Image (spheres, helix red, strand yellow):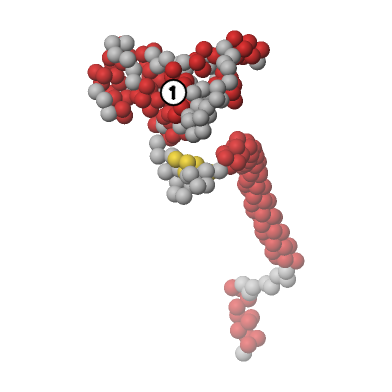
Amino acid sequence: MEAFGMATTKHSRPAQKRKPGRAPVSISRKTEWASWMQGAHPEWFWSDEAKRYARAFNGVLPMWLVHAEPWREVTAERFKAMRSELLQLSVAQCAAYLCVSQAAVKRWESGEEGVPVAAFEALRQQSESVFCRMSHQQWDGWFIERQTGELVSPDVGKLALKPAELNALPMLYGELSMLRNDNAQKAARIDELEAENAALRAGLAVKAVAAELSDMQERIGEMLRSLHTADIVPFPVASDQPLLRKAAS
């Protein structure tokens, strides 16, 4: 601020009386301060270009014009950096956008011809737009709804994300990762329990067979015991047959 004060003191100008309705010939103090904060040199405020802007805008430059930095010279290097680095446009793409020939773009960047301010401004305005920042192959088809401010996806029908929802995505991904880990642990535990259950079932089946065999053994034992205690009825032999017939007669 001290440097700005010194500069303005050095170039102090006497108060001018303007006729009513006459456009000012100098930029307002507030515009000077805003421009200086953006990098304007104090000498520029006394240039013919600054006076031309002052007459056109009644002494008060809009902020979009201040951000355009009209005090900086549009050089071939600035134009090429704007095209190739910021916008990442090829010469052919730049020429198609500006409706000029590729040869004209090459002449501007080589310094053979001066760069038209309008051409540079067209690129600069695009570089500062939100659409430029979204102009990437991975964001093909995405756009911001102007009325709602939502980011709309072309891949999923009617998917529109608000800034708060985008900010919450990292937390959602964190919760998703935790749930996946928890599910993996539970799945592993379920596998263990299923294996244990299968083993128990196999053991129970063996026990059931053993119990059935034991029961069969007991029944067989009872049958054998019943045979040992049964009354034995003697059957007649051949030598006894005449006696039986005689008794019957």
Q: In this view, does 137 lie to the left or right of 148?
A: left
Looking at the image, the residue that sits furthest to the bottom is 249
Identify which residue, 148 or 205, lies in the foreground. Answer: 148
- In this rendering, the answer to whether 165 lies above or below 205 is above
Secondary element at image label 1: helix
The residue under label 1 is 52
Name the residue at 40% across, 25% down: 121
- In this rendering, the answer to whether 184 lies above or below 80 is below
Where does the image place residue 156, in percent across and percent down from the top left? 45, 46
Q: In this view, does 7 lie to the left or right of 26?
A: right
Q: Can residue 36 be seen in this view?
A: yes
Picture quarter with the N terminus: top right
Amino acid at circle 1: Arg
Where does the image place residue 57, in percent across and percent down from the top left? 48, 30
Q: Can residue 176 be seen in this view?
A: no
Identify which residue, 127 or 18, lies in the foreground. Answer: 18
**Dot 1 crowding, Cα within 10 Å, few <14, some 14–19, many 20+:** some
Name the residue at 49% across, 34% down: 21
Q: Is residue 85 left or right of residue 107?
A: right
Name the residue at 35% across, 24% down: 119
